[in-house]
Image (cartoon, rainbow, N blue to C red):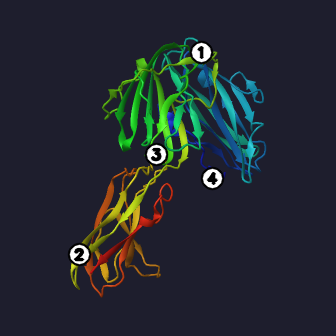
Amino acid sequence: MKTLRVPRAFRLGVAALAALGTAAALPAPASADTGPGWVSGWLGDTTIGTAGAPGRTTLFNLYSSTDAIDPRATFDLSGLAGVATASFPDWCVTEATTTVTCPLPPDASQDEWDINGNVPIVLRALPGAADGASGTIGYTALADGLDGWAQQATVTVHAGPDAIDLVDEYVDGFDTGDQLAVPVALLSAGDRPVKGLRVTFRFPVGLEPAAYRNCRYGAGDLLSTIVVCTVGGNLKPGARYEVPGGFATTVGPAAIGDKRIVQTVAPAETAGPLPEGVTFSRRDSGQSLRLRQVARPVTVIGPDHQYASGQYYLRAVHGAFDVAALGAAATGTLGDTVRVRVGLRNDGPGVPDGTISGDRPTHFVFTPPAGTTVAARPSDCSPWTSEEEGDATPVTWFCTQPSPVFAAGETFLVDFDLRVDGPLGSPGEVRIPYGYPRVDDNPANDTAPVTVS
């Protein structure tokens, strides 16, 4: 028997939000590899409402190499007894009351190396299945000549009201001064109505939320604004609701680059405490955030809507900003050690923000003046060696501010101790090697001299 293998990583989409909702910790993918090619499958754990709640659709991912013969998956549903039912597409075959076999889906995609497709499975709680009841779905991915590896996914029942956020939107073409109508949409997903809803928003720096009477506002981390709104109403199970006209938001002067507004919905009775570390206050307003039902209740929730959190993503806000390099001048003679303070200043109004990408937008390259050597350097700077192979003497230093946000008016300064050990010659420099999220509006001040005389 050959060694089991997993050919490539799964694309988990919004798995980072899974802790907020229905999809729980994920098991390792099942893989079989004993003959020609390989085949693998994966099914995540799922939480469903008790009887009376809409059914939930979960996806089983089946993928194989192009040379695998008749790739398929078998499912053992006996572990769901007394807990839930599982419905499969009509191109799957029920071989016994609790055994189902599914081939690759008709719409499976194929590339040079493999074939990949999803099998939708609709899960519904059985009458009498109480809150916290759980069962399992066993599954095995296999193909002709390939031994299968059996795994399980857990299905857990949750009683009470529940809500799913439906917003996942990407937009382009906005600039500072523009007005946004941020969509707010949700589905009542539990077995009982949602009596009062809490919606929590995180607006990144540069996006300015409008004031509503039924919302509270506070300063979050990294210059963000946290907004918590409580909306009354009796939201029927399976029904979809929206805020007419969306949540009014202004693209402020601090906005540049990509921006993401995250929103999370929860029944007011189970929403828990307010976000920690934020002091909230209300703003004067003549308007309230309200919900209206926009569609008849559904009996099954689709696979794309499974989480309590959603996002509204703005791509490439151009904005305006200017980050200036700050050089220095010092005086010293041969043998002296002098200190220079160098860095950057954000003259605004835009605020470079790397919270989405994970980048650190504030960085520069420091080159000491000729005739000097760095005797002590700050912890935020790392050396680069010269281009000559084998020369370990650093001739430039790359410095990065730890924070992913560089506020307008803020400076990032570091101290270098320079030893004068030779004839003083050409000046050094502070230079911005590349702009973030783009080249700023005044490239002329992206370099500044550093002199020792």
Q: Secondary structure at mark 4?
A: loop
Q: Earlier in the sequence, mark 1 or mark 3?
A: 1
Q: Which mark is residue 126?
A: 1
Residue 412, compared with residue 447, is above or below; it is: above
Q: Residue at x 43, y 78 (%)?
A: 386
Q: Is residue 103 visible?
A: yes
Dot in front, 4 or 3: 3
Dot in front, 1 or 4: 1
How dense is the environment of label 3, judged by Cα within 10 Å: few (below 14), some, or many (20 and up)? many
Disc 3 residue type? Answer: Ala
Disc 2 residue type? Answer: Val
Near-viewer residue (254 or 381): 254
Q: Which residue is mark 2?
A: 338
Disc 1 residue type? Answer: Leu
Q: Which residue is mark 3?
A: 255
Q: Earlier in the sequence, mark 3 or mark 2?
A: 3
Between the C-alphas of marks 2 and 1, the distance is: 77 Å
Disc 4 residue type? Answer: Thr
Could you tell whether 149 is left or right of 446 in the image? right
Q: Position of residue 336 (x, y in %)?
A: 21, 81
Q: Position of residue 438 (x, y in %)?
A: 51, 57
Q: Which residue is mark 4?
A: 3
